[in-house]
């Protein structure tokens, strides 16, 4: 919106032109359409007496992407001004392009790679946060929080400003069949078929193998060439959920000492835990990867609010309802 607060009477009037610069291989950019404060069609011309808060003009330009695959689009803006009192006087104000050239934080990315949704665009510089519902899934939340604290890279932690990177449909990493690497491939490395889940009280229900970082990320212990790659899930921190054994209904996250007699060292780059299946499958069932238009290597955080009050992972901390 443009609102001139003063126009010298000697200028008689001012006309502004909004110059849109779009760096895009598959885009069409419309002409600028102007409207006044009442949304009536207008132009960007003011006479001297129209300067002030009621002389606003709204300029609208639409850039439409019609490409395939994915493309990052650079947008630029400048304003050129001329005055009625002179046929030659011109001035231009350059408002830049898509932000800092190192990160291009204002450059949208458009794609048609997500088969579950129509083509669309996002600002990939923004890193979203997925919040685990720790009221419903406290065991899973406790496990994720503990691993975020203990893993050397603190993958996914908001506190440690450490991102997880999504394993997207456009990954260039291949499996042995020459197909794009999938979360099932990563999971098979950490949670192979036949792995014996740690037994737990029947009140916890059916148990399943839960890995952290998730198989849908580059930080998974099963992701080839990743920071946390392991050759076997046995190299991960081994944990399990169970009742505390104090006669109450309380349960906790405990060290599984079947593989490592002294429990996790805190240096492991992944976690493998025996968790109630309803917790494992439920904690991320609302993860909105398609609606967030996450593609390969996009960064996300994971928040576990029921454990935010915990000072660190070296002392016992009790879940809180939030």
Image (tube, helix red, strand yellow):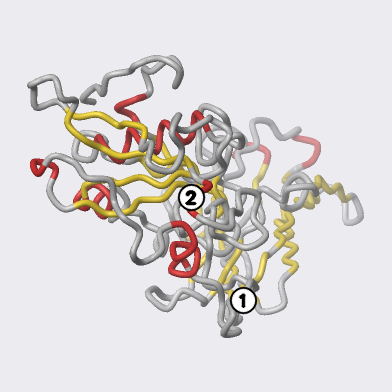
Picture layout, residue 105 above or below residue 191? above
The residue lying at 53 percent from left, 30 percent from top is: 266
Q: Is mark 1 on a helix, strand or loop?
A: loop
N-terminal label among 2 and 1? 1
Quadrant of the rendered structure where residue 195 is?
bottom left
Please state which of the two labelled residues, at mark 2 or mark 1, is closer to the viewer.
Answer: 2
Q: Is mark 2 on a helix, strand or loop?
A: helix
122, 263: nearer the viewer: 263
55 displayed left or right of 225? left
Q: Quadrant of the N terminus?
A: top right
Residue denoted by label 2: 234
The residue lying at 36 percent from left, 39 percent from top is: 239
- Marks 2 and 1 sit apart, C-alpha to C-alpha, by 24 Å
283, 96: nearer the viewer: 283
User: x, y percentage for residue 98?
Assistant: 72, 52
Quadrant of the rendered structure where residue 263 is?
top left
5, 198: nearer the viewer: 198
Quadrant of the rendered structure where residue 173 is?
bottom right
Picture layout, residue 140 above or below residue 26? above
The residue lying at 9 percent from left, 27 percent from top is: 249
Q: Residue 174: which numbered mark, if any?
A: 1
User: x, y percentage for residue 200?
Assistant: 19, 41
20 displayed left or right of 208? right
Residue 134 visible somewhere in the drawing: yes
The residue lying at 43 percent from left, 34 percent from top is: 261
How would you rate the neighbour count of disc 1 (Cα within 10 Å): few for under 14, some for 14-19, many for 20 or more? few
95, 213: nearer the viewer: 213
User: x, y percentage for residue 47?
Assistant: 66, 44
């Amino acid at each position: 919106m443009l609102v001139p607060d003063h126009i010298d009477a000697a200028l008689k009037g001012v006309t502004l032109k909004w110059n849109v610069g779009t760096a895009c291989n598959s885009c069409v950019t419309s002409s600028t359409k102007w409207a006044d404060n009442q949304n009536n069609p207008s132009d960007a011309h003011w006479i001297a007496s129209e300067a002030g808060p009621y002389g606003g003009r709204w300029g609208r330009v639409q850039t439409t992407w019609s490409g395939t695959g994915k493309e990052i689009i650079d947008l630029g803006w400048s304003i050129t001004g001329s005055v009625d009192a002179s046929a030659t006087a011109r001035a231009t104000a350059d408002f830049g392009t898509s932000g800092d050239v190192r990160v291009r934080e204002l450059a949208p990315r458009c794609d048609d790679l997500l088969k579950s949704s129509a083509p669309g665009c996002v600002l990939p510089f923004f890193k979203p946060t997925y919040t685990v519902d720790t009221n419903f899934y406290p065991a899973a939340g406790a496990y994720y929080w503990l691993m975020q604290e203990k893993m050397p890279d603190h993958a996914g932690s908001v506190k440690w400003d450490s991102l997880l990177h999504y394993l997207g449909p456009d990954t260039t990493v291949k499996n042995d069949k020459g197909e794009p690497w999938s979360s099932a491939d990563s999971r098979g490395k950490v949670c192979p078929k036949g792995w014996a889940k740690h037994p737990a009280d029947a009140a916890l229900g059916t148990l399943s193998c839960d890995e952290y970082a998730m198989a849908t990320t580059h930080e998974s212990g099963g992701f080839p060439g990743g920071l946390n790659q392991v050759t076997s899930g046995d190299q991960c921190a081994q944990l399990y959920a169970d009742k505390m054994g104090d006669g109450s209904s309380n349960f906790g996250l405990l060290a599984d000492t079947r593989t490592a007699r002294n429990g996790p060292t805190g240096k492991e780059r992944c976690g493998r835990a025996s968790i109630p299946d309803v917790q494992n499958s439920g904690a991320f069932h609302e993860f909105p990867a398609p609606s967030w238009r996450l593609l390969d290597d996009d960064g996300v955080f994971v928040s576990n609010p029921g454990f935010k009050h915990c000072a660190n992972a070296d002392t016992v901390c009790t879940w809180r309802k939030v």
